[in-house]
């Protein structure tokens, strides 16, 4: 996990463009936000944008989405 403002492969966490699922609403439910770079996917809790976040290889994210889509 990364803390706010730390360098991420030449980028700052605050420089990432975060996206919330189109299935999310603003009622305070369980939501995540995702930001991508060419090699990495960053995942954070939408209710705590300044908190820690998970950083995984883009290939692992693709594998996750592919597996999830089959279910």
Image: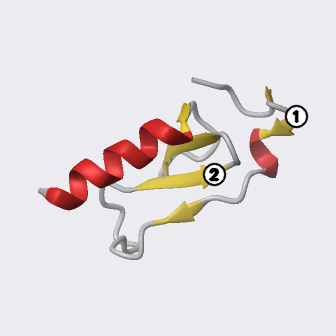
Report the residue that reaches farthest toward the left.
71
For image coordinates 30% across by 60% down, the residue present is 29
Residue 54 showing in the rendered view: no
Q: Secondary structure at mark 2?
A: strand
Q: Nearer the viewer, residue 46 or 55?
A: 55
Residue that protrudes farthest toward the right in the picture? 10
In the rendered image, which quarter is residue 19 located in? bottom right
The residue lying at 75 percent from left, 40 percent from top is: 13
- The picture quadrant where one finds residue 40 is top right
Residue 45, can we see it? yes
Look at mark 2 in the image and give the residue it sits on: 36
Vertical comparison of 54 with 45: above or below: above
Residue contact at pointers 2 and 1, CB within 8 angstroms:
no
The image's mark for residue 10 is 1
Residue for point 88% across, 34% down = 10
Residue 12 position, x and y percent, is 82, 39
Answer above or below: position of 20 versus 22. above
Q: Nearer the viewer, residue 53 or 55?
A: 55
Looking at the image, tell me whether mark 2 or mark 1 is earlier in sequence order.
1
């Amino acid at each position: 996990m990364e803390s706010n403002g730390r360098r991420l492969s030449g980028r700052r966490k605050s420089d990432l463009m975060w996206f919330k699922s189109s299935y999310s609403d603003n009622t305070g439910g369980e939501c995540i936000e995702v930001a991508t770079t060419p090699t990495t996917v960053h995942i954070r809790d939408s209710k705590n944008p300044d908190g820690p976040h998970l950083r995984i290889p883009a290939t692992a994210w693709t594998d996750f989405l592919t597996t999830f889509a089959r279910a």
